[in-house]
Every structure is written in C-alpha cells, then in structure tokens.
Image (tube, grey):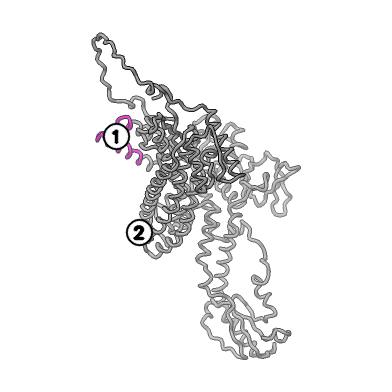
Amino acid sequence: MNYQNKAALDRVIVAGGALKSTISLSELDKAFPELFSKSGGETTAVQSFSAVSWVYRCVNLRSDTLAGLPRSFYRLGDNEKVDPPAIYADVDFDHLLWLTEAARCIWGVSYWERDPGLHWLNPSTMSIVVQDNVMVGFRQSVMRAKPELFGPDDLIYLPMFNPMDDLGPGIAPATVALTAAGLSSALLKWAEAFFEHGAIPAVILTTDQRIKEDDPELDRISRMWKRLTRGLKNAWETVVLSRGLTPTVISPPVKDLVIPKLNKQVREELSASFGIPITMLQQSAANFATAREDRQSYYMDTLFPEAKMIAAGSNRQLWKPLGYEMRFDFDAVEAMQQNEAEKADAITAMMEQVGDQYEDQILTRKRSVWLVEQLWDQMGMKFPDELADEVPQPQAQPEEPKTPEKPEVVEEPEDAKAVILPPDISVIQNIRKDLRRWRRKVGSRGPNCSFISDYIPEQTAKAVRLRLLNDCKDVFRPWLEGKALDSVAERAIIAALQAIFDEYLPGIVSALEAGDMPDLEDMYRQIRGATIPIYQDVLAEQALANAADLGWGVDYEDLLIDANDWARTRAGAMANQLSVTDNKRFISILDSLQRGEVASDAIPGMLGGLFGSVRADMTGITETTHAMRQAAARLAANMRASGIEVVERWLTAEDEKVCPICAPLDHTTEEVWGQAIAGGPPAHYNCRCRIAVEYKQKGQS
C-alpha cells in the first residue's frame, strides 16, 4: 500500500469488531481510542463494587459474616453480660456493623455519628480536617448542600491502616484489588462488545484501487458491513466485496487470549486482597474437607482480627467512657465450635488409647498420668489432684530393730576418688580468645600458618587444622558463632526444599489434571541429595560448638564419619515421610476429581499446603531439631566414654510459642524427659527444643 498522500489513505476502508460505521485509515485512532489513546479514566473502588461481581461478592461476604458474629456488652471489669446503654437500646447493631465492614472494605474507613441512633455516615461524603498535622474535626459534603462540620469527638472514627497517612482513612481491600477488578471489568466489556457486533473480530478492508468517496459501490459495501456487525441475528449474512477489497483480521483469535487464565488470576488477586479463601468465593473449587478448613482459616486469619480492630476502636472512643465494653464471642461461632468438638473427640480418643496401653502394660503408670495431664491441659481443664494417684500405696510395716553390724572398711583406689570438675569459666574464655587470635592470623597469613596455644584442647586444635586443610567454609564458626548454627541450618534446609518444590510443582499439577498419579522418585532423590550435606555439617559443627561450651574437645574425623552415617539415614527417613504424605494427598485429589467434587483448576490451591513455604519452613525447623539432638547425643556419648559424668538437659525456646507438650519438660534432665519423650526432641512437628550437655554436679541425680 502507498502511504505517501491523503488520496492513498482514503483507499483503505476499516470495518468490523465493535465499529458502528465504515471509516478511513486516517481516522483509525478515532475508531479505536482504546488502542491509540490513554484510558478515559481510572476505575474507583466504588465503581468496581458496582460493576465487578467478584468485588461485590467479597464485600458482601465479609460484611455478612462480620455482622453475624456473636457479640455482647459487659460492664468494665465484669464478665457478666448486660444490655447496651439505654441511650443506644434502639440501635440495630447488625446493620451498623454490616455497613461498617462494607465501608472499610471499599473506602478503608467507617464513621458513626455519636447520636442516640449511632447513624452511619457514608465515607464518600466525609473528609478529615487537619491543622498543623493534627486532626481537628470532620467535614461532610452532600451534593450542593453546605458542608457540615463535626468536632473530633462528635464521630466514632474507624480507619484501617495506611502506611503513608497516620490521620486519614486507610487502604481498603477494594483499593488493593483495583487492578484485578479493572481486568475483570475489561474482560466482560470486551466479551459483551464482541458478541454485540456479531462475534466478528476486528477487520481491515484494503484495496489498491482508487475509490472516490461518492462511489455508490463503496456506500453499498459500507451499509452491508454495518448491518453485518450490528448483532448476532446478522452474524450469518453474506457480504459481497468488490473494488479489490480484501479483509484482513487485525485481532488475535479468541482462543489465544487466555481468558480462563486471566479470570483465574482475577479471582486469586481478589482472594488475596480481601483475605477470603478462593473456595469460599467459588464453592465448586474444593471438596467438603478443604472447604471447611478454608472457612476456619478465613475466620481465624481475616474476620476475627478485623472484628477485634472494630471492637477496639469503638470501645476506646464510645463504650469505655460510658463504663461499658463490647466483645465478640469468637468461641460461639459455629465453624469454631465444630473445630473444638472435633478436637475434644480426638483428645477423648487419645485418652482411651492411653488407658488401654496402661492396662496392657505398654505404658507405665507415671507416663500414663503425665500424658493424661497434658491432654486435660489441651482441653483447657485442670487435672484433678485426687486423680493423680488413685491406687493406694501399701503402707510400710514397721520392722524390729536390728543390732547394727560393724561395716567392713574397704580402701578405695586413689584414682577412683578423683572427681573431674568442669573447667573454670575463665579457661573457656581463654580458649575462645585464642581461637579468635588464630582466626585473625589465618586471615592475614593464610591457612597454613602455625599457631600455638596453652588453652585450646588438643582435639579442638586438630579439628581446626583439618577444617583448614579441607577448606571448610567458616572454619571457626562452630567455636565462635555456635549460637547461630540452628538458624543457618534451618535456612539452608528451607531454601533447598522450596527450590525443589517449585521445580516439580508444575509437573505434579499437570499429572493430576490428566488423572495420573505423579511419579516423584526423582524429586525425593533430589531432596535426599540436597539435605545430606546440610545434616552432616550442622551435626558436626553443633557437636563442636557444644564441646566448646564445656571446654572439651572431640575427635573431628570420627565425628564426621558418625555425622555422615546419620545424615544419610535421616535424609532417607525424611524423604520417605514426605512421600507417604504426598501420595495420600494425591489419591484424595484424584478421587475428588473422579467424583466431580472439585474442578481441575482447583488443584494448585489444594497442593499449596504440600509444596508451599509453610511445609518447607516447618520441615526445616523440625529437621534442624533432629540434627541438634543428635549433636548433643554424640557429645554426651563421647564424654561418658572418657569417664566424664554429664547430664542432658531439655531446653525450650521459652517464648509464647512453646507448646503444652514441651513446656513441662523445660530444664529437666533425661531422667525426667526420657520417660515422656524417648530419645528427646523433636517432640512433635515444628518442635524447636534443644538438649544441652552439662557436667554432672556433685550430689546431682
């Protein structure tokens, strides 16, 4: 085509798609403004709520569930329920809370007027008044009416968090989801326009012939084309072209537009923005068990924190000054009651198992009582003191006094009387001081430099030289940075697992979508290969670190051999555990697919728990605890073999995450914790407890 002059441009005719008239190529930018110009305006959160069904669903779902939460009023400092203050007796709190949550979802803020009706004010009419960086009131502007001013104490102000503004409204979920909402709206508008104009793609009609604007044939073709693109009823009519006109499609085929994937992305973005699991937005996306778990997660992770924020704001500004307090009763929520009921049933079944094993003499009485006490504690109940020892113990019968015999005096060998005492703290400090000097010397003169110390144990010095010879990373880390070893190991295991999960997850999804059982033998082999060196390093280095705390040295070569053997065994056991869990889940998913309980596009979400960060994190923590326990066990065995009496003391993390299983074992020795958890930590998945090896003190049991 010739683009040199206006006459040539007028030979080109454009039609099809959503065009309502026939135009020349010179007017192409006017016909397709969405292609050749900027958007006519940005979509607002209010518009997305009004136009996008997914946003409408999310806002209504959050508002409905929050307004339906059980709640009560209490006098300050009292736990007995009372009626709300008489002045607010006629307030419809269900409606008020519904509007409050809807406003926070759309505008990021809600306003209540402090009058007897607690009237909700539309945030679109409200603004805050700020002077000298201090909020001094509120302004309401309704249509053309004169703005009304409110003092700072005239309204209840409930904003969400805004990292860029400490005074104004927060960032609403609908605002965060605007991009996804705009994409959803654009997809619907495009589909509507496409079918409205006969489901004909955008087409350019071109010709090399000169055509005058008043050519009657051009007018005929234009009328026929406009009629063809006016709706579905004309979609099958025929247009006869002349004057050398050739149609060229300029839009991609519909099948190449990946609309299903875009719709899926929209749902996932909105699910994340509003904190609502996808299974609650699309009920067909999960089976019953998954849907129930996701619903409980929604209440725990999204709705309850939101309710606490609203209750805290209203209590601080309204109820507490009146001597009242509003509380939400989360335990009364049906979804939570079902969870607690199942938990109680499971604990009851475990109690029965403990009783059966005690009767079969599998468990000792002391161990059985301890386990039952923990189960009672799990249910939030105090174990009755009278049940702690039901069986009456036989009373000792008095014996007739006997004439004491003169004991035989046996001379104890002199070396047996010697007591090996732990080194003075100054000795350990001198050991570390010399190790730091050695590290500085290596840094300046290289790994082959000589170093002599009067304090470093011979085995420790040998271990340093071997690590220098083997070019170990962070040669001196076990002795000088031992407290950081567990976090280093956790990060290494987590990173290795997550990388492998990410690599194999697409293939797993594809296999399940095809109805096949995934073959993951290579994945588990890769997991074993990636974790063996991590296990070996953390066990060996932690054993060296523990020994340094005691001023003791261990044979590094023997330690490496033991560490390698254990690492291979543990890596295989861990991979097998993952395999068993994965296969059970795969079978469940395939069964649900076969029964039609879930759609194939729900598979990635159903696998998130198995191949996501949560499992990698928990596995990393648990496996590090295994390695740390083995390091302590190896050191204790080494010292006992040398005639040193030591104790192994259980230590928890001593924070709010410590579980009721491990808390009673804190600072106990193996004589106590060994009866409860044979072998030591981990006591459960995600256990962070450690075993500390200590010198046995005189008179210590």
Q: Does residue 306 appear left or right of residue 618 in this picture?
A: right
At a point 26% along the width and 10% down the height, the residue shown is: 405
- Quarter occupied by the C terminus: top left
Q: Is residue 522 above or below residue 464?
A: below
- Quarter occupied by the N terminus: bottom right
Query: Is residue 367 a member of the stretch shown in magenta?
Result: yes
Q: Position of residue 436 (x, y in %)?
A: 58, 38
Query: Is residue 690 a member of the stretch shown in magenta?
Result: no
Question: Is label 1 in a helix, a strand or a loop?
Answer: loop
Residue in front for this viewpoint, 603 or 52: 603
Tell me the number on the disc at residue 591. 2
Magenta range: 345-368
Q: Is residue 670 above or below residue 331?
A: above
Q: Residues within 10 Å of mark 2 (few under 14, many from 20)?
A: some
In the rendered image, the residue lying farthest to the right is 132
Residue in front for this viewpoint, 608 or 167: 608
Q: Position of residue 420 (x, y in %)?
A: 43, 26
Q: Quadrant of residue 53?
A: bottom right
At a point 60% along the width and 51% down the height, the residue shown is: 172
Q: Position of residue 356 (x, y in %)?
A: 27, 36
Which residue is identified by label 1?
Answer: 363
Q: In whole angstroms, how far apart are the C-alphas of marks 1 and 2?
A: 39 Å
The amino acid beneath tag 2 is: Asp
Question: Is label 2 in a helix, a strand or a loop?
Answer: helix
